[in-house]
Amino acid sequence: MSNFVTLTVQKRSSTGKGANRRLRAAGLIPAVFYTPGGENIPVQAPELPLEKIFENHGRTTIFNVEIVDGDQKTTAPALLWDIDFHPTKNRMLHVDFFGVDLEKEIKVRVPIEYIGTAKGTKLGGSIETFFESMDVLCKPLALPSKLVIDVTELALNQHLRVQDVVLPEGVSSAFDPSVTLVSVISASAAAGEGEEGAAAADGASAA
């Protein structure tokens, strides 16, 4: 754990909208630390260091959270689990930290990055991506920051499914293996799908 970046937070006793507004005015973000054992600890995090953690680590990299409670300090590895942002300003309003046991598997949603130019698009097809992220199972230290999927070899009307993706060692998908992640669809196939969709809509209207 000593090699991880550390974010120092303080345990807080005040909760509610008024207390949270005062924290934000002071440059602090209200948060909750969820321990692996199921305990919920209200904390407050300094805004700028927290933003830096998010920029550099995102939601898929382990870091240390040091919780200061009076004279006591406890440190635990964690992930940034959930973030509430202001609807119009690029500012965090509330954060959930998810404490992890480094020896136990967790399920985490990992972003997908599609790379390459599919063969089928050079023949008039269009590429359709159905998922921008995938739920994976692994121990925290095996967690990839993202999944890179190369679509170069996809031909017209060809699909790439979960079962076709080579995952890093120690990582497995929590998705059904038959789920399609990305396809190259020809113009005729796309038109057929459109006609089927219109027919289904007409049928629903008639019902």
Image (spheres, helix red, strand yellow):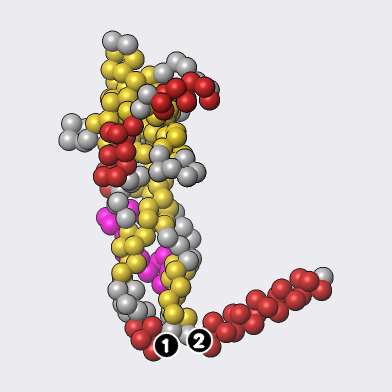
Frontmost residue, 131 versus 20: 20
- Compared to residue 78, the image places residue 25 above or below, namely above
The reply, left or right, for residue 157 in relation to residue 102 is right
How packed mark 1 is, by other alpha carbons closer than 10 Å (few <14, some 14-19, many 20 or more), is few
How packed mark 2 is, by other alpha carbons closer than 10 Å (few <14, some 14-19, many 20 or more), is some
Report the Cα–Cα distance between label 1 and label 2: 7 Å
Residue 105 placement: quadrant = top left
Measured as percent of width and height from the top left, residue 8 is found at: 28, 26
**Amino acid on which the number 2 mark rests in the picture:** Ala
The reply, left or right, for residue 145 in relation to residue 19 is left
Residue at x-position 34% and y-position 67% = 114
Identify the image quadrant of the C terminus: bottom right
- Compared to residue 12, the image places residue 204 above or below, namely below
- Residue topped by disc 1: 124
Q: Tag on residue 162? A: none
Measured as percent of width and height from the top left, residue 46 is found at: 32, 28
Find numbered disc 1 in the image and state the secondary structure of the residue it sits on: loop
- Residue topped by disc 2: 187
Measured as percent of width and height from the top left, residue 154 is found at: 37, 79
Q: Residue furthest right?
A: 207
**Amino acid on which the number 1 mark rests in the picture:** Gly
Q: Are marks 1 and 2 in contact (CB under 8 Å)?
A: yes
Frontmost residue, 161 versus 146: 146
Identify the image quadrant of the N terminus: top left
Q: Residue furthest left?
A: 3
- Compared to residue 155, the image places residue 130 above or below, namely above
Find numbered disc 2 in the image and state the secondary structure of the residue it sits on: helix
**Residue 50 visible in the picture:** yes
Residue at x-position 38% and y-position 84% = 120
* Highlighted magenta segment, given as a residue range: 160-172
